[in-house]
Amino acid sequence: MTTDARTGPAPTPTGPLSQIDYSERIPNNVNLASDRRLQRALEGWQPKFLDWWKTLGPALPTKDVYLRTAVAVGRDGWAHFEHVPMEDYRWGIFLAEQDPDRKVNFGKHKGEPAWQEVPGEHRADLMRLIVVQGDTEPASVEQQRILGNTAPSIYDLRNLFQVNVEEGRHLWAMVYLLHAYFGREGREEAEQLLKRNSGDLDSPRILGAFNEETTDWLQFFMFTYFTDRDGKYQLGTLKESAFDPLARTCEFMLKEEAHHMFVGTTGVQRTVERTAELMKEHGTDDVFEHGGIPLSVIQKYLNFQFSVSMDLFGSEQSTNAGNYYSSGLKGRWQETRRKDDHVLLDDTREMNYIENGKIVQKTVPMLSALNLDLRDEYAADCANGVRRWNQALEDAGLEERLFLPHEGFNRRVGVYANHHVSPEGEVLDDATWEQRKDAWLPSPEDRRRVAELMVPEYEYGKFAGWITPPSTGINDQPVEFDYVHLAEEGLA
Ligand code: BYC
Ligand code: FE
Ligand code: FE
């Protein structure tokens, strides 16, 4: 189902329905031209989006970037690559093809036809979910705004910008739903999506992780590994939604998401590989001296980004989540492959919580614990990349390993929120936590030393000293390809 930049086949149109109309001001495959009111409303939002992109999008001036653009949403090819000025990227509205026989697959409406309109009783909840999803997309662009100034290579710079334009498109995807299905309230929410800003004290982004600073490229790689992966899992549940336009939108977004996680997995991997080389060459763990990032600091960045991303799943027990499920708004990861009744009224599961300073278990109704169900799927997936990174350490003949911290480590949401838990899973008192937390989370000093290594490398085919080159380029181009042409002012 997923395609990434390396394997994306050449575009082969699959039929008129899956084709995207690029002759319109807003490229789309939803026949926007047939709905003048909606088209005008979205054309009214478009300049506001572009203003936002110019003010809060990528700060480094560029002439053009080798970007992938969707040309069709069908199975056999939807990506087209060319050099385009970033502000001319064709942000548009792309939904996966409609299945006219699609049914609701879970909850109390199970077996009924999927909804093409929003049922009045679920309107507020659906809009809330769409707004939360939509809010994260521009937030990430804002968080990554200044990274171009310190890109370790032109190859990496291109990947950053590809992620940024696609997150911009994901915002378009949610704004389309708000405009098309939620009337005036939806249009107001669409405006707000550009007005809240990451880290803003007065009007911050909705979810915690999207107000954290992305301080440097290691943080960016951890973000695209761990936080974009929350995106994968949340979109995976919304793809199951009874509200068909949301399901189809998310299905297509997921195809783009694969590349974001590729950037994270390989970015961390290449960082670890360079660290391993330097550790062997110099026989020391402290490779800062030699221009690399120590493994212990990589582990701290990992601890941080994993824990703030775990918070994105909400409380382990949530009546919201149970209601979303029963109402058919939000399913489970791979809902249709689960071997149960897809209603879950009689099911239970085990859940960890803290009692008298110890982590213990209790049995809870499954419907109440769906955030936890999703989070467990997510955490298992996160472990795969860590195994890959450890393979690189093993291949280098090193004993050291990276690991995912305990689920209770550094949590602000859910059962662990008012407790301190070490990465190994010991419950700690406040004093012990304060004393030891700098060994587990990046300290200002760690971030400062990482930042010192973040010198831009804009020469084609060259890479900053703290990271290895990738094994292949993008879309079968060589690694030293001119993926980005900087503007003259950017070079000065
Ligand atoms: N920070 O019942 P609970 C992506 C709020 S990432 C702040 O446990 P629920 C991307 C919650 O809103 C995917 N507040 O939560 C990645 C609620 O507030 P109210 C984004 C939080 O509703 C990288 C209250 O606490 N998509 O796409 O079951 C780059 C009670 O919480 C947080 C989605 O999240 C937090 N971390 O679940 C670009 C999907 N967590 O109502 C993009 C849509 C919870 O009491 N969202 N709260 O005022 C959802 O499905 C749910 O809203 C959540 C929360 C899973 C986030
Ligand atoms: Fe996204
Ligand atoms: Fe993403």
Image (cartoon, rainbow, N blue to C red):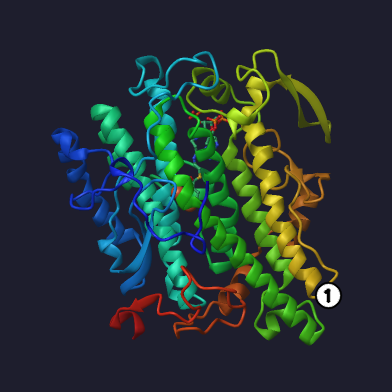
What is the x, y in percent for residue 99? 40, 30
Q: Is residue 168 visible?
A: yes
From what the image shows, is residue 411 above or below residue 337? below
Residue drawn at 74 percent across, 58 percent down: 387
Q: Is residue 440 visible?
A: no
Residue drawn at 59 percent across, 29 percent down: 335
What is the x, y in percent for residue 281? 77, 86
From what the image shows, is residue 281 above or below residue 301? below
What is the x, y in percent for residue 197? 38, 50
- The front one of 229 and 353 is 229
Disc 1: which residue = 397
Residue drawn at 30 percent across, 65 percent down: 86
> From the viewer's perspective, is 120 left or right of 220?
left
What is the x, y in percent for residue 256? 45, 52
- The front one of 270 and 471 is 471
- The front one of 488 and 385 is 385
From what the image shows, is residue 104 above or below residue 39? above
| Quarter of the image where one finds residue 354 | top right
Which amino acid lies under the numbered mark 1 shown in the image of this protein?
Gly
Secondary structure at numbered mark 1: loop
